[in-house]
Every structure is written in C-alpha cells, then in structure tokens.
C-alpha cells in the first residue's frame, strides 16, 4: 500500500507531461523537382534542354503558375523562357512533367534556375541545376 501511494504520484506526473513531438517542416503545396539539363546538338546548333516536374503535395487541387527558366552565365541571371502549363490545375498528389529547349550560344553547360512566378518574385521557389 505504501509503495502504491508513493508510485502513483510519480506515474501521474509522467503521464501528464506533454509528449515530445518532432517539428514537422512545412512542405509547400506546389514544388518543382527532378530538374535536369543537357546540352544537345541539333543541325549544328547547340540546344540547352531543361526537364523537370511540378508536384502537388496538398490535399486540394492547385493552380499551376507559369514556370520561369533562367539561364545563369558569367554570373548573370536572365529569364530565358516562361513555360505555361497546358492544364492549369494539378490534382492532389499529382505530378506533371515539363520541358523546354533553348538555343545556346556558349560553350559549356550553363547553370539553370527554375522557379514559379514573375521574374524577381521573392516568393518564388527556385531549383538550381548545372
């Protein structure tokens, strides 16, 4: 009886402590993933090919904004193209590929930044490749 009276308060104290829950990083509803680039030759011209996918991580359909592809050469970033998705809405859990081909005048494979939104938009997600 004495042991029960001494253990019960300790048990109740530990039972009432909040449980440790690790912090869960918030994942944006839409993300750009699997960005790859390659330098190809087409009829004697250098072509920069950019491939990737847009993923919807949310439980609701999301409108896909335009995708900006910036080429980074000699430390300068310039918007090379804007990709408009044919289907503007991405279903929950859906992933949709995108690609573009750009004329390339330089020698080596340049860096590429792929993002959502307008050029210079601080809220856009950027994925670098190259």
Image (cartoon, rainbow, N blue to C red):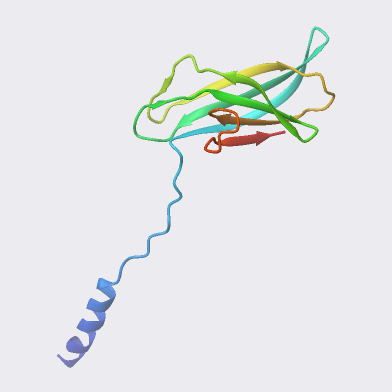
Asked if residue 77 lies left or right of residue 93, the reply is right
Asked if residue 93 lies left or right of residue 80, the reply is left
| In the depicted structure, whether residue 52 falls above or below residue 103 | below
Image quarter of the C terminus: top right
User: Which residue is at the front of the view, 13 or 117?
Assistant: 117
Give coordinates of residue 123: x percent, y percent: 52, 38
- In this view, the residue farthest toward the top is 43
At a point 66% along the width and 23% down the height, the residue shown is: 50
Asked if residue 26 lies left or right of residue 48, the reply is left
Give coordinates of residue 98: x percent, y percent: 56, 21
Res. 69 image quadrant: top right
User: Which residue is at the front of the view, 51 or 9?
Assistant: 51
Give coordinates of residue 112: x percent, y percent: 69, 30
At a point 48% along the width and 30% down the height, the residue shown is: 55
- In this view, the residue farthest toward the bottom is 2
User: Which residue is at the front of the view, 29 or 66?
Assistant: 66
Res. 82 image quadrant: top right
Image quarter of the N terminus: bottom left
At a point 17% along the width and 88% down the height, the residue shown is: 5
| In the depicted structure, whether residue 13 falls above or below residue 60 | below
- In this view, the residue farthest toward the left is 1
């Amino acid at each position: 009886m004495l042991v029960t009276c001494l253990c019960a308060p300790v048990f109740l104290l530990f039972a009432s402590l909040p449980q440790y829950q690790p912090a869960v990083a918030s994942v944006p509803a839409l993300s750009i993933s699997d960005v790859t680039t390659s330098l190809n030759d087409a009829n004697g011209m250098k072509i920069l090919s950019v491939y990737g996918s847009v993923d919807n991580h949310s439980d609701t359909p999301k409108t896909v904004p335009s995708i900006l592809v910036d080429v980074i050469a000699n430390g300068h970033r310039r918007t090379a193209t804007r990709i408009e998705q044919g289907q503007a809405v991405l279903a929950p859990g859906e992933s949709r590929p995108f690609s573009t081909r750009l004329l390339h005048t330089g020698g080596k494979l340049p860096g590429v930044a792929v993002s959502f939104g307008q050029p210079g938009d601080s809220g856009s997600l950027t994925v670098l490749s190259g």
